Amino acid sequence: MRHLITPICAAVALALATPAAHAQNAALDARIAQLATQEEAKVIAWRRDIHEHPELGNQETRTAALVAAHLKKLGLEVQTGVGRTGVVGILRGGKPGPVVALRADMDGLPLTEANDLPFASKVKTTYLGQPVGVMHACGHDTHVAMLMGAAEVLSQVKADLPGTVKFIFQPAEEGSLPGVEGGAKLMVKEGVLDKPKVDAVFGVHINSKTEVGNLNYRPGGEMASSDRFTIKVHGKGAHGAYPWNSVDPVVTAAQIIMGLQTIVSREVKLIDDAAVVTVGTINGGVRYNVIPPDVEMSGTIRALNPEVQKQIWASIRRIATNIAESAGATAEVSIDPYVPVTINSPALTAQMLPTLQAVAGNANVHEIKAVTGAEDFSFYQEKVPGLFLFVGGMGKGQDPATAADHHTAGFRIDESGLTLGVKTLATLAADYLTANPAKQK
């Protein structure tokens, strides 16, 4: 987490230096904006095609083939099969300079779509043994389409780009099947940030409750870490009529659940950092009048600070173990770290803020509070400075309370917001390259 704390002087210096660089490149940025607007119909068509044909994590073969064909048509160097089904395109500019990466995720979710759209998903599959539909219920279809558009735009101005742009189309952001590695973590492991080595990475996420035309960001911890925990309580079974013959794991599990609620309310300094500990499942027993020997529960941990994350891990182990011991039972605790905190480099955020304001307009760029959702974009940010943004996808004038949440069957996006995403990605790449000429490869 080396980008969590960055000297203020560096951020200020970059922020002050950037306006001059932007003024010098006004013509390039204007050209990018013009090209992005011209791409709107293509981007919407790509989005609808991908939306109608969603694929689950590590199964994005059709989507990957569509992306690879597009990048090859643009004349990019293309790598396929990265991180299982990922695609990487490399665009080398007309001048030497740094390397910037732009990332989009490709996978859908195991949900049956409820929208009445001509391009609504009708795809069915089996997930964890259960029949279910497949749907782009988090906007990854828009992310792919926007990055395809940005690649086309930047390929048309590559002669003016001092450096290299790496386009990362990533599978399995929503996670893989149990025991199957995937997503950003695997892509990083396989060297996606190397050859050529990336200096900075940018990503955007559509938001169904933010009005189109707006960009939201936060320096530092923006999205939470996400970890899964499992607690197995081992007691002694007995007839339900004779509980004194048992070491009741059901009662013990209930006490552990209540004890876990004190972690956030009594141990985390909430005025500094928010956190969440949620028990989502509890399973034990097969009959109403039998006390089972074992109970198992699982849940999620969310934190916005890596140190708080580790504190919560220790507290869960301590509380579960000690409560079980007090009841004469034992508790087996396992914690599976899934996604780190999404930490936007403060220096990079300060440097690129003028770009965001130029692209969307000052009044439409907002610094937001951190959210407890998670994003595996954080794996890239562990290696290089990164900036992750939210792009408005809600219709103008709509009440956010009436907009369907992400990860729901009614999730939908106003496609008029996609052009801003294309402009943002392409301009961030161009402005970063022109503002950092010293980083020649």
Image (cartoon, helix red, strand yellow):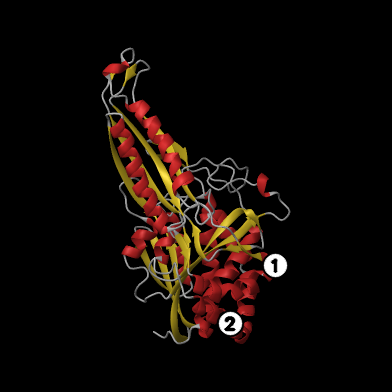
Q: Is residue 97 positioned above or below 57 on the image?
A: below
Instruction: Check disc 1 and give the amino acid type.
Output: Ala
Badge 2: residue crowd in 10 Å (few <14, some 14–19, many ≥20): some
- The quadrant holding residue 33 is bottom right
Marks 1/2: CA distance? 20 Å
Instruction: Check disc 2 and give the amino acid type.
Output: Leu
The residue tagged 2 is 16
- The residue at the point 43 percent across, 59 percent down is 64
- The residue at the point 45 percent across, 73 percent down is 200
Q: Can you see residue 226?
A: yes
Q: Is residue 216 positioned above or below 327 on the image?
A: below
- The quadrant holding residue 408 is top right
360 left or right, relative to 273: right
Quadrant showing the C terminus: bottom left
Q: Is residue 377 positioned above or below 76 on the image?
A: above
Q: Which residue is farthest top? A: 241
292 left or right, relative to 170: left
Badge 1: residue crowd in 10 Å (few <14, some 14–19, many ≥20): few
- The quadrant holding residue 330 is top left
Q: Nearer the viewer, residue 53 or 37?
A: 37
Q: Position of residue 59 (x, y in %)?
A: 39, 51
Q: Nearer the viewer, residue 420 or 257?
A: 257
The residue tagged 1 is 363
Q: Can you see residue 161?
A: no
Quadrant showing the N terminus: bottom left
Label 2: which secondary element: helix
Q: Position of residue 354 (x, y in %)?
A: 61, 75
Q: Which residue is farthest right? A: 397
Q: Position of residue 296 (x, y in %)?
A: 33, 33
- Of labels 1 and 2, the one closer to you: 2
Comes first in the chain, label 1 or label 2: 2
